[in-house]
Amino acid sequence: MKPLVTSLIFQSFILVFIGSCSFRPQGSIRSILHNVNADCIIQKESVERKGKLESGIRGQVKFLEEKENFSSISDKMAEYKIPALSLAILNEGKIIWTDVYQNANFPEEQKLDCASIFQAASLSKPVTFLATIRMQAAGDIDLDENIQNYLKDFKLPQGKQTAENPVTFRNIFSHTSGITSGGYQGYTKILALPSDLDIVRGSAGVNTPAIEVVTLPNETLAYSGGGYTLAELALQDLYKDELSNIMKKWILEPAGMEHSEFTQPLPDSKSDLVAKGHTQSGEVVAGGGWNNYPEQAAAGLWSNATDMAKFLIKIYNAYQGKSSIFSQSDIKSILSHERDGSVYGFIVNHAGDDIAITHYGGMQVTVQG
């Protein structure tokens, strides 16, 4: 079996998620210490390695005979003006340590820890997609069925799709549905959130256009947040429930992502857990530190590095045939659908026998009245 390396990276004004797994013979179970920050993890034998990484970041280029200079995480956060960093390191399919770092150059309005949550932006997409893999395995959905058959109150406007070549969950998640490309800006917290129906229809008060099938399904690879909102609408119609509850049942709880949720907007009781967003000029995002994203499947996940690492480990274990929530055949089937270096939103890289899959996420905040 070829080794698989998996990573999820989210970089915006305030954080980076990093996770990586490499396939090597499994080691013994190690004791875990929770002695960094609340809910942070460090294995005893990883303390020294953690310290070396925190203070020994190499530059990209070193000339012969030139003394090598090392940077610290704090140095890099100052250089790139990152207010806060949530970091998880994985090795051999296990979390070896997690931690949270804050930039001393920014006003410390809150003390963050490994229970703090961040807006995961487009990392919402792979989490949503992997949930539907479980739904198909359970026989609840067919990824290749015409998505119109799952929709109750919305008729997808006739575009380039046909009865023989329809829009499906599969081509939505692989960004080949032909639906209008683009992402989402979010809504300030003082604004009422539009419904999913409003969003796909482009109704008054919505800051994105109505979705359209502008190219033939399965023909063109084009990133489409609107496609994911159509899938969100279909899942809610199927299960007669809100997407946050559906995702909690099908992926967040099974994957052990205890700090993560798709709730939009968050209840006030959880607002103190949120790592606030910042503009490029260093100011806290207007309206309390974040925008709301009713387009949950595409951009509405709240999470942190520890939980995203747990998600990666489920993919890692499934690839080896050792997962309790995904089958090995499901993960291998996903990887077999590579197209132009992409597979269901993941970037795929091959190096010898190694297969690396990476998914990025980021957001731009538009200030609204």
Image: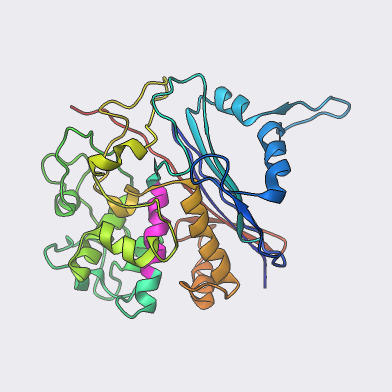
Image x and y of residue 101, in percent: 53, 33
Position of the C terminus, as image quadrant, is top left
Residue range highlighted in magenta:
122-132
280 shown above or below 346: above
Is the magenta region chiefly helix, strand or loop? Answer: helix
Rendered residue at 17%/32% (across/down): 190
User: Which of the 4 quarters of the picture holds residue 187?
Assistant: top left
Image x and y of residue 115, in percent: 43, 44
233 shown above or below 363: below
Rendered residue at 62%/31% (across/down): 73
User: Which of the 4 quarters of the picture holds residue 63?
Assistant: top right
In the foreground, 341 or 248: 248
Q: In the image, is residue 128 part of the stretch drawn in magenta?
A: yes
Position of the N terminus, as image quadrant, is bottom right
335 shown above or below 138: above
In the foreground, 296 or 230: 296
Rendered residue at 56%/47% (across/down): 34
25 shown above or below 261: below
From where the camera sits, is residue 220 visible? no
Q: In the image, is residue 363 part of the stretch drawn in magenta?
A: no
Image x and y of residue 337, in percent: 49, 68
Image x and y of residue 12, in percent: 44, 35
User: Which of the 4 quarters of the picture holds residue 235?
Assistant: bottom left
From where the camera sits, is residue 330 visible? yes
